[in-house]
Structures are given as structure tokens and as C-alpha cells.
Amino acid sequence: MTLMTKGIVAMVSLLCATPCDSRKTPQSEGPPNSLIERLQPAFRATNLRANGVLNTTDATGGTKSMKFVFFNKNDSAGIHQRRLLAFIAPSEMRGTSLLAIQEQWSQQNIWSYSPLFQRARPLAADEFMDSIVGSDLFYVDLFFPCDELFLHRVVRTETLPEGETLVVETTPKRAAGMSWYGRTLSWVGKNMQYITKVEFYDHQGKLLKTLLASEPREIDPGLHLWLPTHLSITNNQNLHRTDVVIESATTDLEIQDDLFTTEHLERGRRGGLDAPSE
């Protein structure tokens, strides 16, 4: 995985939108790794619940809309990551859920649950780049990357409508197998609290998809945490598009550890992942 979930999360990571501490705005000084690290220290220790809508549009203009609830819980170091994504509408999607747990940088596990089969199925590593429910979010986008395995390099500055940005290139230090993407380019606003654009390239150097983040909202005034509430992801190779709209988000809650278990996942419609206890 690359910079998307580090600078923007998971959908939530939201998905792949990452809240950041506005008191730690990135500057051009210092090594690129430090620049990136300034974007997400507050989020690493944050419990997050978000409700939203995921809309997909194919090359012919056909659309599909799904409502979801997303939970995130990390340890203070950001190594132990737990994320739960459950779809609650339309009716045929209700109860379809994903559970992502990372115990160590090298130990990442994802389970999918479908009410049709009524069991949680572990995903194999070669499925991590598959699409989540036909969207342009991949299963691997549910995790932060390991800093030790990637290099961040400021390649240029660029002015966007939102303001001046630093364009940061992220590449794997080791063999291509260490990264699900060949590289990413991220537009980091010097005076913003989040990454506003990310380009994802495959291992052949071709642009795979582009993510745009907009409409930030302060979800925790005490910690000055901001979250982009609109993510637009375009697959540049098949012209498919996914829009994620965050309707509500909060960090003011306690999330029980047993929420992030396959037992809870398998309750599906019966246990109500659409309305888990807080």
C-alpha cells in the first residue's frame, strides 16, 4: 500500500481519508519523510466512526449507490490497525462487510463477509488488489503503509485551486513485491490539513487511478482534526469512477475491541453491523 491511506485513509483511511492535526501544517523544509509524518500523528491514536455513501459510475454512465458505516481504531504507534467497513443499503448489500487487521507491518489480514454465505472468508494476498464491491477502492487501501519500506521525495511545487502544494513521490525501497502500487504522487497542501490529490501508478509506470479529496470538515475541534468529506477516485485505465461522500464522522466515542472480530462480522444482518454498539 502507498500514501493514499497514510495521508488520506481508508475511506474511510475512509477510507482513505486521514484526519490531520491542523497545528502541524507541512512545510517545504525538512526531509520528505518528516513532511509526510506531520500529516497524520493525531489520527494514529484516534477512534473514528463515519457514515457515508459510496457511488460508482461505469464508462457507460451506469451508476450504483451504497450506504456504509466505517470504524477505525489504531494504537498510538499506528502499527496495530483495526478497521471495519459494513454496507447497510441497498437491501441486497446490507450486512456485506470487511474486517481489516494489522498486528505488525508485515502481518496484514482481511476478512470479507457476505450474508449469502453467512461466514467470514479470509482474503488471500493475491486478492488485496481486487475491487471492493465493484468500486475503485482496493482491499489494500484499508491499510497504512510501512514507513520503513518507502521513500518520500518532493519532486516539485504546484498551484491548485486550493492553494500551493508540494508534489511528493512515494516509491518502495525494495522489490516491486513490497508495494501493491509501483509509485504514487501526492499533492500536499502547504497550508491545508489534508492531501488534496493522489495519483496511483502500476508497476509498468502507467497511471492507474487518481484520487481527489475536497470539502474538509473539522470533526474534532479540541484536537483540530479535519476530514475531507468528498473523495473522487477515477480509474484512468477503464474510465470507472467512485465517489465517497462522508455524511457524518466523529472521534468522540469509545469503540469496543470485540467489534473487530470475525465473530462480530458473522452476525451480519442478525447482529446488525449496520448499528453496532458504541
Image (cartoon, rainbow, N blue to C red):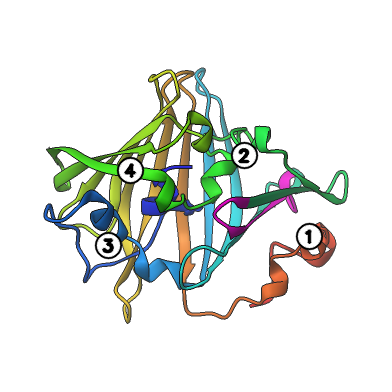
Which of disc 3 and disc 4 is earlier in sequence?
3
- What is the C-alpha distance between the residues marked 3 and 1? 33 Å
Magenta region, residue range: 93-107
Q: Nearer the viewer, mark 3 or mark 1?
A: 3
User: Element under label 3?
Assistant: loop
The image quadrant of residue 273 is bottom right
- Rendering coords of residue 61 (x, y %): 50, 23
Which of pointers 4 and 3 indicates the residue nearer the eye?
4
Residue 132's label in the rendered image is 2
Identify the residue position indicated by label 1 in the image. Answer: 262
Q: Are marks 1 and 2 in contact (CB under 8 Å)?
A: no
Question: Relative to 66, is 168 on the left or the right?
Answer: left
Secondary structure, mark 4, is strand
- Residue type at mark 3 is Arg
Of marks 1 and 2, which one's residue comes earlier in the chain?
2
Q: Amino acid at mark 1?
A: Thr
| Residue at image location 44% in from the left, 25% down from the top | 202
Amino acid marked by disc 4:
Leu
Mark 4 nearby-residue class (10 Å; few <14, some 14–19, many ≥20): some
Q: Is residue 97 magenta?
A: yes
N-terminal of the pair, mark 2 or mark 4, is 2
Q: Relative to 194, does residue 73 appear above or below in the rendering?
A: below
- Can residue 127 be spotted in the picture? yes
Report the mark closest to the observer, 2 or 4. 4
Q: Position of residue 142 (x, y in %)?
A: 55, 49
Query: For numbered disc 2, what is the local secondary structure?
Result: loop
Residue 120 relative to residue 5: left or right: right
Query: Which residue is denoted by mark 4 in the rendering?
Result: 151
Query: Residue at left 53%, top 79%?
Result: 253
Q: Is residue 174 above or below residue 208?
A: below
Contact (Cβ within 8 Å) of mark 1 with mark 4: no
Q: Foreground mark, 2 or 3? A: 3
